Amino acid sequence: MNKHSGNKQFLCDKHRALALHNPEQSKRLCCKLRAMARDYISQQRWDEAVPVCGTAFETADILLRQDSNSKYATERYLRSAIELSYTLRKSRHQPDLSAMVDLVQQRLAPFHAPAPLQTLLAPLVDIAFSALSDVDDWMEMLLAMDDAHRQTRH
């Protein structure tokens, strides 16, 4: 499925089938996986974060296909793509991030006009192609904002 990681699939067939048939459980799984990945990212355990981020991304992709009109599905998909791209850059993998950006753009193109789509893709493009030092600063702020948001929920 994923050109960005040498066609590696992170979800096995059994879990892919479960994700396809149980969207509510898949939403919870994706949330749990992203939280786990963020823990690995915060500890700079990049190689351990890659399969977790990849599984979250594939789960988000399935959820997007099931509910493509939902802004939450789009946001979940984009954030998962951003986190996977960042983790791949920081790991020992040699990602093809151009293919990743193309994949995300192709997936979202049917649901968004070209100008808004380019705006949605801007953070992913920045993660993929900006200097890693700039990306590190940006991701640190993004993850800190996410942590603050999670802690203020009741």
Image: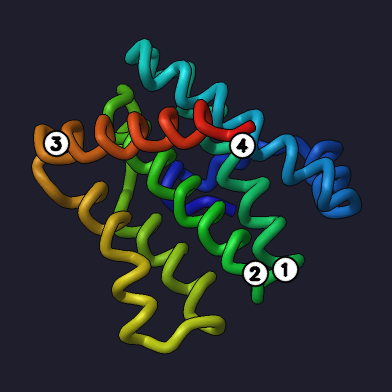
Amino acid on which disc 3 is placed: Leu
Q: Nearer the viewer, mark 2 or mark 3?
A: 2
In the image, taking residue 63 as reference, residue 125 lies left or right, namely left
Q: Nearer the viewer, mark 4 or mark 2?
A: 2
Amino acid type at circle 1 is: Asp
Residue 70, disc: 2
Q: Residues within 10 Å of mark 4 (few under 14, many from 20)?
A: many
Residue at the bottom extreme? Answer: 113
Q: Circle 4 is placed at which residue position?
A: 55
Assess disc 1: are there few (<14), some (14-19) or many (≥20) residues with their C-alpha within 10 Å of its C-alpha: some
The mark that comes first in sequence, 1 or 3, is: 1
Residue that appears at 46% across and 63% down: 103
Q: CA distance from mark 4 to mark 1?
A: 18 Å
Residue 67 disc label? 1
The numbered mark, 4 or 2, whose residue comes first in the sequence reads 4
Q: Position of residue 112 (x, y in %)?
A: 48, 83
Residue type at the position of mark 4: Thr
